[in-house]
Amino acid sequence: MLSEFDLIKRYFAQHSTTDPRIALGIGDDCALLNPSPGMQLAISTDMLVSGRHFFADADPVMLGHKCLAVNLSDLAAMGATPIAFTLALALPEANPTWLQGFSQGLLALADEHHCNLIGGDTTKGPLTMCITVFGELPPGSALRRDAAQVGDDIWVSGTLGDARLALAGYWKEIKLAAADHKLAAQRMHQPTPRIALGVALRGIANAALDISDGLIGDLGHILERSKVGASLHIDSLPAGPILSLQPLAKRREFTLAGGDDYELCFTAPIAQRAAVIAAGLASNTVVTRIGCVQAEPGLRLLDDFGQTVSLQLTSFDHFTTP
Ligand code: ADP
Ligand code: MG
């Protein structure tokens, strides 16, 4: 039988580091960080709850990846470089197979982004993981939600809607071939945090966020905080590879309001178009221009002919979405 301390030691504390930014890692009452001189800390927390954010029988390797990925995505959306994270874990039981898979998926992504596991808490309870990430960035360079300017282009990274399509497959809302469903599900379970793009956009983009609850709802946060409006060219939204094959109405619905995409939506001055494209190339990330920021409040959806489209779409909300 694994004790709490054996469990921490075996699956999480092996993540020792020689990173000079970590003065003290797992094992004491606090971890100690040395952010690089002159840098500002960026801190974010995200929690994943079984039955709410993932199925109870989800693959533990993918779950380990996803719970860190959604946190790194917040650092990316701010333009921050990852330093470290803590992990608070509630487990129904100490199952070695599950823990082995979970820590493997988690720590592989952590290593990829040089993000060190520096502490946490472990307790028995309904399966829940809560991660806090720490990143750094030069003062004044954060990509904030309140910084969009009238006239800015609106951009999005990668593709949208495949995670929602995977869900539609699970719910049998849409019939998908097994291979197609697998591809879409991959996007749902293993999102790619756009860290390199976020960092490359420092000094180029004005405002940014990561899309977790659906593009229109999340873009709405930028518009509200920046006190501006926007129009979106909804048929230029980059759909994921499987979603591209679906009928127009589904493509529109899932790219606009799908959720769980973890792509970046950002605004940048027209004069920075070439720089945005260069940032996309440098970070190996597709970027697509999807609209523009306007003084008139509200969000206008336009089709390929420039006609206004009226769609009843809402983004995901934990307390109002059934
Ligand atoms: P305390 O009683 O002081 O809160 P704990 O006994 O909870 O300390 O944890 C012992 C050490 O193990 C601490 O350094 C803590 O940060 C670390 N730790 C606990 N759980 C985890 C976890 N899931 N992942 C990483 N480190 C953990
Ligand atoms: Mg503790």
Image (cartoon, rainbow, N blue to C red):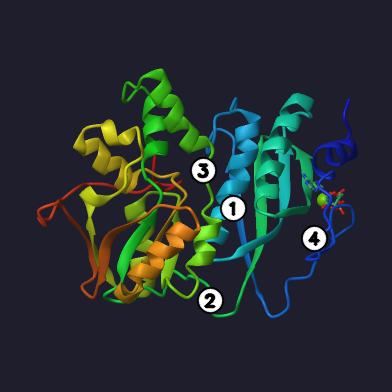
Residue 41 position in % (x across, y down): 66, 71
- Which circle's residue, 4 or 2, is located before the other in the chain? 4
Left or right, residue 217 beside residue 299: right
| Label located before the other in sequence (1 or 4) | 4
Q: Earlier in the sequence, mark 1 or mark 3?
A: 1
Spatial separation of the CA atoms under disc 2 and disc 3: 25 Å
Instruction: Name the one closer to the observer, 235 or 175.
Output: 235
Query: In the image, 130: left or right of 299?
Result: right
Mark 2 or 1, which is nearer the eye?
2
Q: Which residue is mark 1?
A: 71
State if disc 4 and disc 3 touch (CB < 8 Å).
Answer: no
Q: Which residue is denoted by mark 3 in the rendering?
A: 191
Name the image quarter holding residue 104: top right
- Give me the C-alpha separation between circle 1 and circle 3: 11 Å
In x, y percent, where is residue 177?
Answer: 36, 19
Label 3 crowding class (10 Å Cα cut-off): few <14, some 14-19, many 20+? many
In 3D space, how far apart are the residues under numbered discs 2 and 1 (Cα atoms)? 19 Å
Residue at the spot x=14%, y=51% of the render? Answer: 304
Under circle 3, the secondary element is loop
Q: Which residue is mark 2?
A: 141
- Disc 4 marks a residue whose amino acid type is Asp
Residue on which the image places disc 4: 19
Judging depth in this view, the residue of 315 and 40 nearest the camera is 40
Indicate the secondary structure of the residue bearing disc 2. loop
Secondary structure category for the residue under label 1: helix
Q: In the displayed structure, does residue 208 sit left or right of residue 229?
A: right
Amino acid residing under circle 3: Pro
Disc 4 residue crowd, few under 14, some 14–19, many 20+, Cα 10 Å: few
